[in-house]
Amino acid sequence: IFTNEHARSDRQLFWESFPACSIGPDARTTYLFTYLDCDANKAHTVEGQFEQYWDALPIYQRTNNEAFSMPQVSIEDALDNQSLKIHRVLYGLFPTYKDSPLTPAWDRVLAIGDASGIQSPLSFGGFGALTRHANRIANAVSDAIQADALSKNELAQINCYTPNLSVTW
């Protein structure tokens, strides 16, 4: 996880990149993360966040991609001169909650991963928390099924929440 700028407008951008070797030896997957306050009085929008990603990507990639080695080269410029090829753009968001994990709303339904509202400043979502605790959670779910302990209150006891991370909020 990397950031190349100071926090501004109540947020800070964090970058992650991974090799995408199935596409080619020099290919990479790049993620931009940030936390946004959903306060209606804030000027943050999903579209605005994507535009910021699109504008900031050449700055982040400057040392890793020849297409952006010259200052002021935009993604559009790199696409026009064929020094950059985009295979896929995927964009989305997921809500996070300060009061997490979310308590189950129904009997016999257990939310896991991002749907559970579990988040980590280290993994930026519930998937990382889930994978770290997959064996423990699988055993707990198996035990709950065998004991028919499937009420929403009983299922609320099964989670991959890491209380020691809450201090980072």
Image: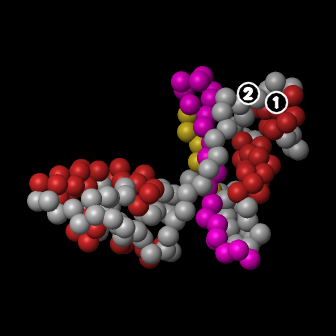
User: Residue shown at 45%/56% (left/top)?
Assistant: 114
- Magenta residue span: 20-41
Residue 73 counted in the magenta span: no
Residue 2 in view: no
Front residue of 84/116: it is: 116
Label pair 2/1, CB-CB below 8 angstroms: yes
Tell me the SS state at disc 2.
Answer: loop
Quarter of the figure with residue 145? bottom left
Residue 93 screen position, x and y as percent: 60, 55
Q: Amino acid at mark 2?
A: Lys
Residue 132 screen position, x and y as percent: 33, 53
Q: Is residue 90 above or below residue 143?
A: above
Label 2 sits on residue = 85
How many numbered discs? 2
Residue 52 screen position, x and y as percent: 77, 54
Q: CA distance from mark 2 to mark 1?
A: 6 Å
User: Residue shown at 77%/57% (left/top)?
Assistant: 48
Front residue of 148/35: it is: 148
Residue 13 in view: yes
Front residue of 156/132: it is: 156
Front residue of 95/109: it is: 109
- On the picture, is 23 further left or further right than 162? right
Main SS, magenta residues: loop
User: Which mark, by number, is residue 79?
Assistant: 1
Tell me the SS state at disc 1.
Answer: helix
